[in-house]
Image (cartoon, rainbow, N blue to C red):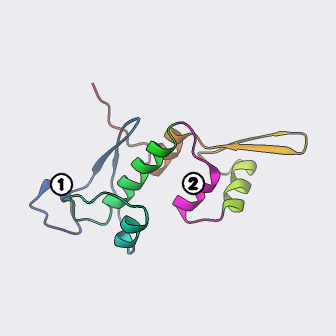
Amino acid sequence: MTTQGDEKHNYNNHPFLGAADMPFALAHNGIIHNDLTLRKEKELPRTKIETDSYVAVQMLEQLADRYPLYIPVSAAADYLHIKEAGLRAAIEQGTCPFGISWRLGDRAAFKIPTLTFIAWMTKGAYALSA
């Protein structure tokens, strides 16, 4: 299924495959209105794929390349376009499905495992590789 670009070219069809330590697939049902802006801001490489959804795959790959084990809370909040304090609060309250937090006295620590974040973003659509 393609919503942009030429559907005759298989590379424009969903789901899109990506790789972040292990392969994943992403299908997006919606419109990313600022895909060209994101591509420029995030310095994403140009490809022959003409759909707006592919920018999400590229951004996940970029995030995983930059943070292979744990994504800083600030980077995850930026990716999700939410406030860092709100994400920290959700992690601490246990309502965030991909973050971990712990307390030691008056100090708190937060971790976001990269593969857990990507699994959540792709709804667990990992492709098995041989």
Q: Quadrant of residue 32?
A: bottom left
Q: Marks 1 and 2: CB-CB under 8 Å?
A: no
Please name the residue shown 46% across and 44% down the image: 64
Q: Look at mark 2 in the image and give the residue it sits on.
A: 76
**Residue visible at 27% across and 24% down?**
130
Q: Amino acid at mark 1?
A: Tyr
Q: In the image, residue 43 lies at what x, y percent?
A: 38, 61
Q: Which mark is residue 11?
A: 1
User: What residue do we see at 34% from left, 71% from top?
Assistant: 36
Residue 62 as seen in the image, left or right of residue 47: right
Circle 2 residues within 10 Å: few <14, some 14–19, many ≥20: many
Q: Which residues are magenta?
A: 69-83
Q: In the displayed orientation, state which residue is furthest to the front.
A: 43
Dividing the picture into quadrants, the one containing residue 101 is: top right
Horizontal side, residue 106 vs residue 38: left or right: right
x and y, in percent, of residue 44 in the image: 35, 59
